[in-house]
Image (cartoon, rainbow, N blue to C red):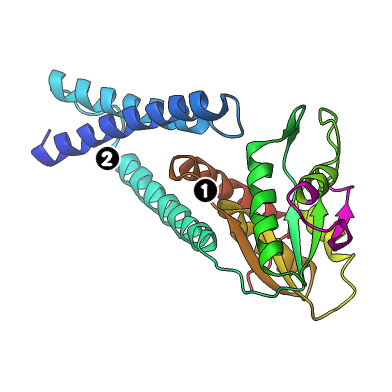
Amino acid sequence: MSRRSQLCNRLFLALGILCILYYLGMGITVRFGQSLLFLWLLAGALCLLRYAIWRRAWRLGRPLPVSRRLLRLWRWAVCLILAVFLTVEGFVVSGAFQQPPAGLDYIVILGARVDSDGPSGALRNRIQTAAQYLQDNPETIAIASGGQGSDEPMSEAQCIQENLVALGIDPARILMEEKSTDTVENLRGSFAQIPEADASVGIVTNDFHIFRAMCIGRKLGDFSLSGVPVPSSAFGFVHYAMREFFALTVDGLLGNLAFS
């Protein structure tokens, strides 16, 4: 094994360890079992397996257990997948840095989980960001969006509405959409409550979710759309941005996205 091959193999070792540590960190600080978190554990295990196979072949002086042609094809496939992944992630990251204009006609606050003791962390952050925008822009109307799951004590829209009122927002400025179960339904139901065809509309959601929400919004309506991103921690953003790649793939296959 050449010096370059040894260095490459050590990089796989380091990457595998980092992936497993990240999996443990997210599980401990947020929750084990959250959507697609297992992919970090799987990626770490594959990196360590690759390291072990190459290391054993080098120590025993034996050829690798795969042909050079198959290995070359595998490398090209990995490079192609990585290029697509990084391109999509670039769009996801760009959405996180959008700055909403002042004076939007409406903002749609996308729902998230409601716990037995109130809004989840993600929903609480969306409510606080929406409340700040509404306080700074007193003519803007809010649309609280989200139905009630089987394990939620109330609809997400009701939770948003009650917490906005508690933060000083006039209830007359808050419309409700209480039937949706996902982002597509959130926006379809919310847009149906906007009578002006040329209205300016902001979408309030987590920063990693802005790009996909905007693509869905463009597919559903002809409004002037803006993202109102809710900041995430840098640590959590890594996982959630990765997860958006798969969500965008599914929505793209279902025809839910418009990119312009």
Q: Which residues are magenta?
A: 165-181
Residue at image position (60%, 30%) is 34
> Is residue 215 at all visible to an observer of this figure?
no
Q: Secondary structure at mark 1?
A: helix
The CA distance from mark 1 to mark 2 is 34 Å
Name the quadrant containing residue 143: bottom right
Say which quadrant the C terminus sits in. Answer: bottom right
What residue sits right under mark 2 in the picture? 68
Query: Image height check: is 45 above or below 198?
Result: above
| Disc sitting over residue 172 in the figure | none
Side (left or right) of 248 relative to 156: left
Q: Amino acid at mark 2?
A: Arg
Residue at image position (63%, 62%) is 228
Residue at image position (79%, 71%) is 221
Say which quadrant the N terminus sits in. Answer: top left
Residue 53 point in image, percent of width and height: 27, 24
Q: Amino acid at mark 1?
A: Ala
Name the quadrant containing residue 255: bottom right
> Is residue 199 at all visible to an observer of this figure?
yes
Q: Nearer the viewer, residue 42 or 102?
A: 102
Q: Secondary structure at mark 2?
A: helix
Q: Residues within 10 Å of mark 2 (few under 14, many from 20)?
A: few
Side (left or right) of 89 relative to 227: left
What residue sits right under mark 1 in the picture? 241
Residue 248 point in image, percent of width and height: 62, 53
